[in-house]
Amino acid sequence: MSKDSPTLIAVDWGTTSLRAYLLGGRGVILDRLEAARGVQNVDKGDHEAALAGLIGAWRQGEAPPILLSGMVGSRQGWVEAPYVRTPAGLGETAAAIVTIDSKTLGAIGVVPGVLTEGAALGPDVMRGEETQIFGALAASGRADGLFVLPGTHSKWARVEKGRIVRFATYMTGEAFAALREHTILARLMAAGGEDPAGFAAGVAAAKALSAPGELLHAIFMTRTLGLFDRLAPAQLPEYLSGLLIGAEMLAAAKDGGEAATVIGSPALTRRYCEAGQSLGLRLDAAPDGCVALGQQALFAAWRGSAD
Amino acid sequence: MSKDSPTLIAVDWGTTSLRAYLLGGRGVILDRLEAARGVQNVDKGDHEAALAGLIGAWRQGEAPPILLSGMVGSRQGWVEAPYVRTPAGLGETAAAIVTIDSKTLGAIGVVPGVLTEGAALGPDVMRGEETQIFGALAASGRADGLFVLPGTHSKWARVEKGRIVRFATYMTGEAFAALREHTILARLMAAGGEDPAGFAAGVAAAKALSAPGELLHAIFMTRTLGLFDRLAPAQLPEYLSGLLIGAEMLAAAKDGGEAATVIGSPALTRRYCEAGQSLGLRLDAAPDGCVALGQQALFAAWRGSAD
């Protein structure tokens, strides 16, 4: 098979958006597209048509198979792919892929999410991030490590011998947005883009905290730092961001030592790496395209044969 | 002077509401009223008319003097009464009362807020709570203790020898509301009134936390506990409330030992006392009317004479 003939259409179909990759041999990305057709914007019964409309051009001639990961496999998505329990490696996850027989698109695999039990506070879940983690492992050739997927609901996952053994979700991005926009802090804050000094002050504040509830105090302090002109209005959102990201990192990095790989957008990855430097944590960035690499690896495991 | 002749009109004028008390000798409450005319609902220049309209009936015949506390003394209020710095007792606070000469209402005193410096994260402030604390001290005859004023922005204040020596604010109530209403948690939660089991589960979760950032994880866990039917939809807000209140208490009670007095509404006081029982903290409730007692004490100190 030529390196350039399409072998897989890999789709990361999340809550708010869809990213699709046309892959050639060994995971080479031949083409890609992105659309704001997240699971929450597609009605039950409309998924097949929505996907066909987007990737139609990739299905001329000999059509490659399709693999989907992310919230598309949740109860609110196209078809439910029940969670695999930790420890979950490529084998366990691929074995739980659910198949859709589509008249127009052929066989479509839906990657399951991962469930971890036994943590102090209850079960935790991911959908889509497992595929990115498998991609980061494939990219680095590693089988062990701590991985962080920052964002609305940041995930920190520990991998041992190629299997996700435990993970925890932090509501960092969404808590930031709710506090930023829907509390008294909103009145004092101004938009102003990135501000490394304000962000660093927030990270330093996170480091100064000693009890969990002090985070609620530090959040209020964002207000008095503004009232007393210790920080400019445009620095306050950056301070709050540094505070929450710093607190998340200090809590999560207890698990797995002081090195972690960030899988995220360039902007968020840079923020996490900056915070890590202040906190004495060694963070490196995963390469772009972890989703496609992870799908490729899952597809190979699913078909039971190396590519 | 008869015990029943009015000696003071004490007004707690906050951001969203106004509470006024007509006081007789020794702080006896002769009459009271409450109105939704908070500082944020009264335009600059309209405060005199707003107050006159509410307390007009109390000013027939020999009109008693008026003392105001709360956000009415902020820059956004009627007149700014600059903060007194800790340590702040009755003497320091009364000495910083600002006088308004009103043509229609006579001399009106405005109680200053209190500012504490030197805490790890920056300056902290209160306005109105200092008066309630002085009232709680007067009611109990004590000169030392830890006081909590729960709510949107909970305050924990340490008092030594009758003076507020330090305090900290926790954005507990407002963070709860923002998370409850403006995150993914909102979709799973149902209104259902008080639920002691859900609340206790949240308090227990707070106790299990070891790092500040774990609070961001525990907040997310509210979602998975709902998804996996570990808690009913109507229990989830109670869990989140117990989690945040418990975390606040564990952080704040490091300062000043294991006993504190709650100054708050009966419903909130009951929640704090319940949480305190689970956490091994001894909380007792201050009597009703601390504001009026505090105003009475400040007035006496202001006039430089015992009542």
Image: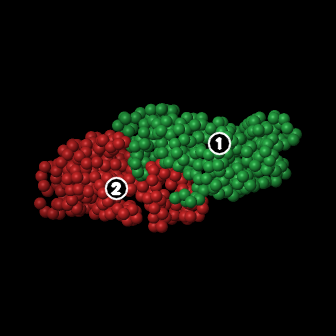
Chain colours: A green, B red
Q: Nearer the viewer, residue A269 or B232?
A: A269
* Residue that numbered label 1 is attached to: A142
Q: Residue at x 21, y 59 (%)?
A: B142
Image position of A48 (left or right of A284): right
Q: Is residue A234 above or below residue B305?
A: above
- Output the chain of dot 1: A
Number of the front mark, 2 or 1? 1
Is disc 2 placed on a helix, strand or loop?
A: loop
Q: Position of residue B272 (x, y in %)?
A: 38, 61
Q: Position of residue B90 (x, y in %)?
A: 20, 50
Q: Position of residue B304 (x, y in %)?
A: 13, 49
Badge 1 crowding class, 10 Å Cα cut-off, few under 14, some 14 to 19, many 20 or more, is some
- Label 2, label 1: how far apart the Cα atoms are: 45 Å
The amino acid type of the residue labelled 2 equals Ala
Whether residue A65 is visible: yes
Quarter of the figure with the N terminus of chain A? top right
Q: Nearer the viewer, residue B294 or B140?
A: B140
Badge 2 crowding class, 10 Å Cα cut-off, few under 14, some 14 to 19, many 20 or more, is some
- Output the chain of dot 2: B
* Residue that numbered label 2 is attached to: B253
Q: Residue at x 77, y 50 (%)?
A: A302
